[in-house]
Amino acid sequence: MEELRRRQPTKENIAVVDVMEGNDNNNKDDFEVIVTLSRRFLERQFRNRHFRRRFLLYLLLVLSLLVYFGSMAYRNLGCQDSHLVTAYRRDDDPDPVYFTVSHDDIGDQGAKGRLLNQRYRLDKRKSDVIPLNRELLDTRPVGCKVRKYHRTSLRISVIVILDIAPTSTVLRLLYSIISRTPPSNLAEILLYAHQPCPELEKGIKTHRIYPAKVIHAPHKFTRLTRSAARNFAAEAAIGDVLVFTPEASEVLIGWSEPLLEVMANNSNTLVGLSKDEFDPKTLVQIEHVPWHLTTHPRWDLVSGIPIEIPEREQRRRQTFPYPNTVPVRTPIIIFEVWAVGREFYERIGGLDASMQEITDYTPGDLVELSIRAWGCHGNVAYLPCSKISVTSLLPDQGYSESKRNQVVLYNSRLVADRWAGQHMNFYEQFQPGSMTIQTTPNSQIDDILRKEECKDLSWYIRKVAVDWKFGDKIKRYGAIQAARQARCIDHMTHDGRYNPGRPEFYGCHGGSTQTWILDAQTSQIQTETGKCLRSDGYMHDVLTLGYCNDGGEAWEWHGTNDNMGYLKFKSLCLEHRLDTSLVLVKPCNKSPQQEFIFEPFKK
């Protein structure tokens, strides 16, 4: 510092010398001298254009890295497990493979356990102690167990998108695939990861799951959406049939033979597989009875409604041996376990990667793909004999409902711009909020539709979704509310085949149990599963639920003005009373207790 003070003042450091020699009558310490010198140095450097350019580039790089790694940490990807518990394989019995964590090591379900559940959306501690080769119930229909399937040389590529599941859950899926699939029909298991997964790759080597391999995005700092990741994995696949399944799932015995037989008969088929469920807290298998193996789209074009198998489809299946095992043709599929021929998938353009996603799914991607598959000379079907059990994940606490609605609305408009055509006015009745949304169309898929001469939505409604109401048959979704009270008719979850019971009046909440459909052509009111109001067999002045095609009475909506009206059958009307929650039937007298409001849902 003494040497610095002896320096003669120059034009560039005159301010520094003035400060150090006390010309401002203040005694500055050495720290202030260093700060002042640094400031002057940076000012001189920033006069250099090249220095400014390099500085901005480095700053952008640092910010990009912070954003990237911050988003990865927020997503809590499944390959980020802090540890992978060791596994052992007995020499004298090579089949059992278990994690070496005892039930005593799980500990109490305290704050740490709740945090783990929130992160993985299932009970990770229980997942770590369940054997990789655990036995699952064979819940297939009886005919599927006795039917003999034709052998085929087709090979399967299973594609899994890694997201939030713990490593033990993913390894259990891999083990179920290799142990329940004929080796000659399994080409590979592709695990797409957004980032390196050393713990999972270590587990694959430890358990010698050789058909499985982890793949990553083509560029290091690129994060693909779920649909784009599936398309990327499909391009890398070598199998004849692509099977897409969630990471928190396990295949059941005999799942591949029915699928391969269907693909051998017609590879231009989009297939929805049947599913069971795992409880996310106990990971115990829950049998799922898909009595409705058909699904029709709604006019939002991103969701579907399960219905009973149409009578014409039942007659077609009766012509085959073991009719309950025959694939069921369906307008769309909505289940997250599905398969498709690889060449057909590539020919029709795959999933629409321009759609936006919500945490662990993309609203409307399978609905749009189903319509495209039918229109581009393919088929869509459900397979009752191919079953995969999927974990029903706990709700995502970090995703807002408003953001979810925005994504659904955007994807809905994207599908409508491509398919609605002359039916756009019917679509906008159900999605009025989409009229102001600007979407970016996928030009690649639009070019494929023109090249393949695919059919439009009018053909699809006329030939495929023949029970889909539109135009003068349009169906309105809404709640039935008492005119003088904020109480709505609630079917109380009695709308299923095996759930008989009476609807009741309940406080209006707009949920699925209060969703009713008003058919503008027949004026009938029914549930989303095809049940209508019927007189109770024991209490004739009380209503219950029965299927609309069973020949019972047809209660009709008689509108008076706006959305107000009466529910009538001949000379009888529905009546609401404050002293009971039952839906009563009385002779029509046009009293205020018999007035109702059909409040359409504004989606």
Image: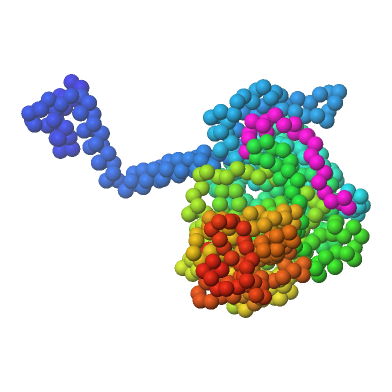
User: Residue at the location (53% across, 29% down)?
Assistant: 111
Q: Is residue 135 on the magenta stretch?
A: yes
**What is the number of callouts on the image?**
0
Which residue is rendered at x = 88% and y = 64% of the image?
318
Q: Main secondary structure of the magenta part?
A: loop
Percent across and percent down for residue 383 are: 79, 56
| Residue 128 in the image, given as x and y percentages of width and height | 67, 31
The picture quadrant where one finds residue 395 is top right
The residue lying toward the viewer, choosing from 379 and 35, is: 379
Please identify the quarter of the rendering in which residue 445 is found.
bottom right
Q: Is residue 493 found left or right of 252 in the rendered image?
A: left
Foreground residue, 359 or 601? 601
Q: Is residue 70 above or below residue 147?
A: above
Q: Position of residue 499 (x, y in %)?
A: 72, 53
Q: Is residue 483 left or right of residue 523?
A: left
- Determine if residue 228 is in view: no
Q: Is residue 524 left or right of residue 272?
A: left
- Image location (x, y in percent) of residue 300: 58, 65
373 vs 136: above or below:
below
**Color theme of the render:** rainbow
Question: Residue at the spot x=60%, y=40% of the render?
Answer: 121
Whether residue 139 is visible here, answered yes or no, is yes
Q: Residue 213 in magenta? A: no
- Is 541 placed above or below 30 here? below
Q: Quadrant of the N terminus?
A: top left
The span shown in magenta is 122-144
Q: Residue at x 80, y 29 (%)?
A: 96
